[in-house]
Image (cartoon, helix red, strand yellow):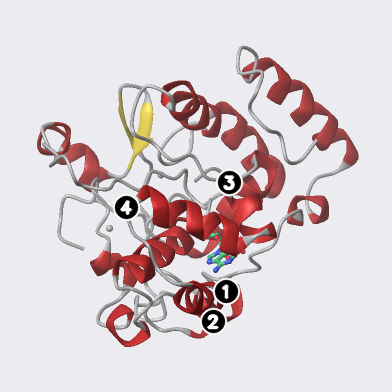
Amino acid sequence: ALTTELGRPPQLREVAGVPLQAATVDNWSQIQNFEANSDDLLISTYPKSGTTWIQEIVDMIEQNGDVEKCRRAIIQHRHPFIEWARPPQPSARNAKDCMVSYYHFQRMNQMLPDPGTWEEYYETFISGKVGWGSWFDHVKGWWERKDRYQLLFLFYEDIKRDPKHEIQKVMKFMGKNLDEKVLDTIVQETSFEKMKENPMTNRSTVPRSVLDQSISPFMRKGTVGDWKNHFTVAQNERFDEIYKKKMEGNPNFPNFCM
Ligand code: A3P
């Protein structure tokens, strides 16, 4: 059976030690052999780091700020996920907020294993035994390659603090030049409040048997520092220790939550 009596898949399967969903593992060779065109743009985010947010920003830039065009389809169809072999679906976000967001996401996402209690999830997250693998490996992997490839590294926290400035960076990276007014529209339309109301971005079209938004909404809080409402003092201290060890050798990587 693919699912338990709760309707959840029993567990994730692994490719090279990275836990992934069954559909991804089954189609791995096809995914691995994908050949990109030189002008393809890959958005690479760790889960719960603001994937949907940067997808909407990129589409709005591509469509020159045309709100109606950006409503042509739900976000999962506008930017399909390369690892979802069936036709529909990585910016970095600080590890602690990511863990909180991922915990709530696993509570509501019936396609991922039940996260258990917060204490249990803490261990799972640290060990990297979550879908798409370890936050540390993901962030370090891309950070180490950022100067070797044509790669724009973005931080959720920066977009939050100064959206216009960061959106401008994305625009330049994409080789676009939009005027101030269009940029302001993009800033407005990609705000948390707007995207939470927008059926094309808030996943409200996904059936409840897949994403149960009554447990936790997909557009949950969209803030920086929610980890402070979840971590105990002891959990936080231990996390900082682990963080220091795991991020050794990446001296310039900004830590937004220490
Ligand atoms: P929270 O659970 O902390 O609210 P992903 O798209 O990678 O799954 O990431 C989801 C996280 O990004 C959620 O975080 C969600 O609320 C947040 N998010 C989505 N759109 C956002 C926006 N426009 N502004 C700020 N945060 C946003």
Percent x, y of residue 255: 71, 34
Q: Residue at the far top: name it.
A: 249
Compute the Cα span from label 2 to label 4. 26 Å
Mark 1 CB near ligand 1 (8 Å cut): yes
Q: Residue at x 69, y 62 (%)?
A: 223
The residue that mark 2 highlights is: 194
The residue that mark 1 highlights is: 191
Establish if 94 lies above or below 6. above
The residue that mark 3 highlights is: 155
Q: Secondary structure at mark 3?
A: loop
Mark 3 CB near ligand 1 (8 Å cut): no
| Disc 3 and disc 4 in contact, CB within 8 angstroms | no
Percent x, y of residue 252: 65, 23
* 162 or 80: nearer the viewer: 162
Of the two numbered discs 1 and 4 on the same chain, state the one appearing first in sequence: 4
Identity of the amino acid at label 4?
Gly
The residue that mark 4 highlights is: 175
Residue 139 located left or right of residue 232: left
| Disc 2 and disc 3 in contact, CB within 8 angstroms | no
* 18 or 253: nearer the viewer: 253
| Disc 2 and disc 1 in contact, CB within 8 angstroms | yes
* 155 or 1: nearer the viewer: 155
